[in-house]
Image (cartoon, helix red, strand yellow):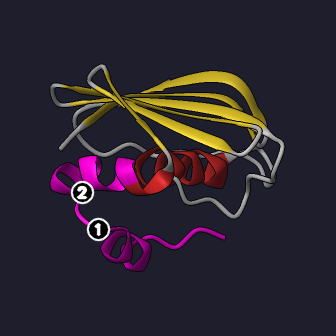
Amino acid sequence: MAIAYIQIEEFMAHRKVVFDFGKRVNIITGANGSGKSTILAALIWAIWGTSERLAAGEQASVSLKFDDHTLTRTFTKQLQQTVLDGKTSVGKTRAEEDLAPIFGTYAAWSRALYIT
């Protein structure tokens, strides 16, 4: 799976940004506190709806384009909504069921990534 881009809106330090990724290795660099780890946190939240960085009452939106799929997860006043290829899932559990065949499990990803 190759991620073509990630669009982040109102997620932590990022108000509205788009990162286009190349087909091979991508390196994200920047000063401390510039939002590098937030990009990975937004990616994880978009896929699994899990983030220690979003507080209740916050609003956020993250969109991913990968392979032949488009995924958008939004969070508004404690309601999560996920749209995968035009199909909407409300709530975290339903979205996990739809996304697990594509991405695998959160447990596997959470062991493979280290975000500080």
Is 39 located above or below residue 104 in the figure? above
Quarter containing the C terminus? bottom right
Query: What kind of residue is marked 1?
Result: Thr
Point 22% across, 62% down: residue: 104
Dominant secondary structure, magenta: helix
Residue 77, image x, y percentages? 77, 38
Point 48% across, 53% down: residue: 92
SS class, disc 1: loop
Q: In the image, which disc is placed on residue 16?
A: none
Is 85 located above or below residue 24 in the figure? above
Residue 88, image x, y percentages? 38, 29
The residue under label 2 is 100
Point 17% across, 31% down: residue: 67
User: Does residue 110 show up magenta in the picture?
Assistant: yes
116 left or right of 40 in image: right
- Residue situated in front as seen by the camera: 107 or 96: 96
- Residue situated in front as seen by the camera: 8 or 82: 82
User: Does residue 64 show up magenta in the picture?
Assistant: no
Point 17% across, 44% down: residue: 1
Q: Count of labels shown?
A: 2
17 left or right of 81 in image: right
Query: What kind of residue is marked 2?
Result: Ala
Q: In the image, which disc is placed on residue 105?
A: 1
Q: Quadrant of residue 15?
A: top right
Q: Which residues are magenta?
A: 94-116
| Separation of marks 1 and 2 at Cα, in angstroms | 6 Å
SS class, disc 2: helix
Is 76 located above or below residue 27 in the figure? above
